[in-house]
Image (cartoon, grey):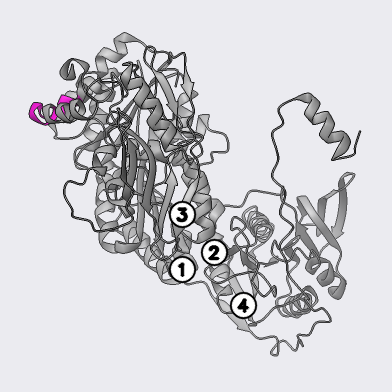
Amino acid sequence: MLKYKGSSKLLLQPTSTDQVSQILQYCNSRCLTVVPQGGNTGLVGGSVPVFDEVIVSLSLMNKIISFDKVSGILICEAGCILENIMSFLDNEGFIMPLDLGAKGSCQIGGNVSTNAGGLRLLRYGSLHGNVLGVEAVLADGTVLDMLKTLRKDNTGYDLKHLFIGSEGSLGIVTKVSILTPPKLSSVNTAFLACKDYSSCQKLLQEAKWKLGEILSAFEFLDGQSMDLVLNHLDGARNPLSSMHDFYVLIETTGSDESSDKQKLEAFLLGSMENELISDGVLAQDINQASSFWHLREGISEALVRTGAVYKYDLSIPVEHLYNLVEEMRSRLGDTANVIAFGHLGDGNLHLNISAPQYDDKILSQIEPFVYEWTSKHRGSVSAEHGLGLMKANEIFYSKSRETVQVMASIKNLLDPNHILNPYKVLPHSFIS
Amino acid sequence: MKIMVAIKRVVDYAVKIRVKPDKTGVVTENVKMSMNPFCEIALEEALRMRESGFASEVVAVTMGPSQSVDTLRTGLAMGADRGIHVEFASSLYPLSVAKILKKLVQIEKPHLLILGKQAIDDDCNQTGQMTAGLLNWPQGTFASKVVLDKEKQIATVDREVDDGIETVRLNLPAVITTDLRLNQPRYATLPNIMKAKSKPIKKFTPEELNVEIKSDMEIVQVTEPPKRKAGVILSSVDELIDKLKHEANVI
């Protein structure tokens, strides 16, 4: 992205929890700051050493420890690359409850630490539900073994949740146990065009009713996103014969190919008659389904090829979500290209503003407007990317002072010397 | 002019194939089945011929168990006008398929029979050739380009052969089998999926067509290819030379 340039003199690659513990113990005693790093695919600078932090990379802790076929519970080390876990599970007949564009390099420890969302959240829920246990090392080297494999465990405070989504600011996640769903054989994918945003919204409502338990993804992209991928992404091909203002990708996952397909076709044809869909195609094989996903997942890659990108990852009630995009377009006029896509099913908008180069004038048109707007509509300024370096100071747009105060107390308790991932997550002024 | 296209239901090309533990074949339960990619190309070519006015009707034919109708519906949703399903529950080998196709050609009297060059499941690459032989029709196999002359009733076919491209001219009626680079098949659009539901599918059994299904071939065993050994990262050029000398024995 060329947005963050790290600076560090030392990278450590521990191979065991014990080594991570020793590293932190030493760093804590000398007040050396540390940045934990997984696949370094984050979008908010959470894994970037800002000044001189010691990088602790989990890459060599990449072993799968155990998998229980009966319960579907996987235990592995934090450095396992998501895609490698996926192919391991595939052989066992299971899938990961999360999937995202960066799967080829991102690591599970990073996914858990940032509470990554992604493409399957609509169906399987967030990592707060799917992660059954973690092993984490605190700033002083204490190893917290919370590596349970229980779905139910109401004994005291459920501390593992502190490490899911705290972006390495409270401890380093070294092992995780995750509940994985079975791989169902019947997956169907449709790529649809809608004439306006309100149709996309109604289609989502209808999909929840009519597809119910088989609905596994509901993604949207606007005409500008489609234009971008078709022009800047290798192998992108418009599955529809003409251009439209909005596109929706629907995926169903179930256990019975013929009944699932029947259900989906009935839903699609009904929606076409009701004019919620203006055109659409239904993948006839896996290859066609991947080519639809390629369009949706390839937007970020295509964006990088067009110059500078300002990325915003916002949770906004679905009803208002696209108003922000339109307001942003009228603010920026011709100076930048505003493109919008995201996980409509989760009310998660990825607002991207692309310009030939980074320009303070453009930035001042975007921020703080985008945050203020989101806050006004009771949205979140970070839906799934986290706060990292980019948005540490923006936390108040989504969280009250009192809430952040409690977060700061927890930070001070678990990491009194503030050695873990400094300048990230919480406003620096607030904790020191 | 009428075009007949043969299509086959196979394990989806993106599925990781698993061999059955008893080595009698590959696992197909709970596995995604789709139209053979070469058949998709064959159908696409026929549809383009119809759209450019060379043909007035495209008939899609498939053979196999009742689920093969799904594949036929896909063909109809892509644009074929009607379908023929020859129902047969167990394996069919190329010669049997060719005999059935011959009978269907005699019933339907198409001017052109287009097939994929091979199916990705058994990789036989024989059906097109055998059918042409039984019908005594000319054949243009591995087509990467087809040009039709409606007046002269001639098809000019570019064939992908080892030395490059061979161009042959065939008098119609003829058999054409398609290679990968002939075209890029279309998607099934919702309006076409809707239309496909009311398109007719005629059913036959091999007995009704007077074809006796038998095979002189027997599958003895199906096994997975040997696993490739993982590569190793060497630390120095000296180590590489040592390995090339003493382990690979190539220098």
Instruction: Indicate the secondary structure of the residue bearing disc 1.
Output: helix
* Chain under disc 4: B
Q: Residue A66 — which label?
A: 3
Pointer 1 with pointer 3, Cβ within 8 A = no
Q: The residue under label 3 is which amino acid type?
A: Ser
Quadrant into which the C terminus of chain B falls:
top right
Q: Residue B85 — which label?
A: 4
Q: Which residue is disc 1 drawn over?
A: A257
Q: Which residue is disc 2 drawn over?
A: B32
Q: The residue under label 4 is which amino acid type?
A: His
The mark nearer the N terminus, 2 or 4, is 2
Magenta highlight: main SS: helix
Q: Is residue B119 above or below residue A280?
A: below
Q: Residue A135 — which label?
A: none
Viewer-closest of A415 and A213: A415
Q: Distance from label 2 to label 4 (Cα)?
A: 20 Å
Pointer 2 with pointer 3, Cβ within 8 A = no
Instruction: Indicate the secondary structure of the residue bearing disc 3.
Output: strand
Q: Is residue B164 above or below residue A277?
A: above
Residue A270, given in percent of the width and then of the height, sits at 32, 62
